[in-house]
Amino acid sequence: MPTGPTASHVDWYFDFISPFAYLQWQAVKQFTGLDITYRPVLFAGLLSQLEHKGPAEIPAKRRFTYRHAQWRAERAGIPMVFPPAHPFNPLASLRLCLAAGAGREAVDAIFAHIWGRGQPGETFDELAPVARQLGVADAHAPQAPEVKQALRDNFEAAVAAGVFGVPTLAIDGQLFWGEDATAMFQDYLANPGLFETPSMRRVSDLPVGTARRIP
């Protein structure tokens, strides 16, 4: 997939809990000519940091979100099977990814297990077939202190960058949130002045008219 010329570094923040991260991964893994760091990050931690509710915590939004993700997958011809229960605790998958080096193969294998085949991925036992595929023979490797620290480092990097959700592509201080922002990201690569037009400048600096009171 052509992405346009760029020398900039890209960080891709994602959590295996997100069906939209799985959908965006299908595009991200096809990108060429980009220096990308894959950054697994705990989405629940971002929600707590920002005092947000996740979509699965609002019943009507949960149903819509799942239907929307499934619809987008089917419309795009992407095989996707939701895992047996959702939301699930993604810590084991995030740590396994980091223990395996957080490269393209690791990200792809874990997404394929959870979302491509609809397999559970909440525990290390459930992820054992993926660990063997990735050459992580030591069952304790994903729980090593350096792996846990790497996950914390990714979270701190996400907070410092202003990331507020997953998946997010970050480049040049710009954030592209959500699977449906993939095309916007690609447009920015082709035209780094995308946000310098009068209309983009206006909406970027639009004054706040009123604010909701939170008791």
Image (tube, helix red, strand yellow):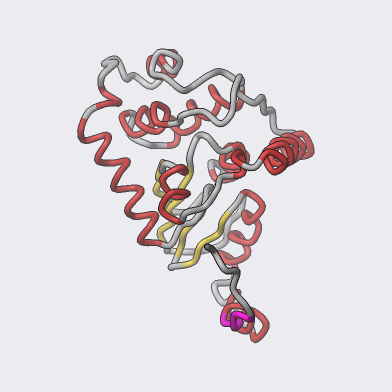
Q: Residue at x 53, y 22 (%)?
A: 113
- Quadrant position of residue 61: top right
Q: Which residues are magenta?
A: 205-209
Residue 140 position, x and y percent, is 26, 19
181 relative position to 165: left or right: right
> Which residue is situated farthest in the left direction here?
145
Residue 50 position, x and y percent, is 45, 56
147 relative position to 17: left or right: left
Q: Residue at x 53, y 41 (%)?
A: 29
Residue 84 position, x and y percent, is 61, 19
> Which residue is situated farthest in the bottom direction here?
198
Can you say whether 88 is above or below 151 in the image? Answer: above
Q: Residue at x 46, y 22 (%)?
A: 122
Residue 136 position, x and y percent, is 32, 20
Q: Residue at x 42, y 53 (%)?
A: 11
Foreground residue, 122 or 56?
56
Q: Is residue 56 magenta?
A: no
Secondary structure that dominates the magenta span = loop
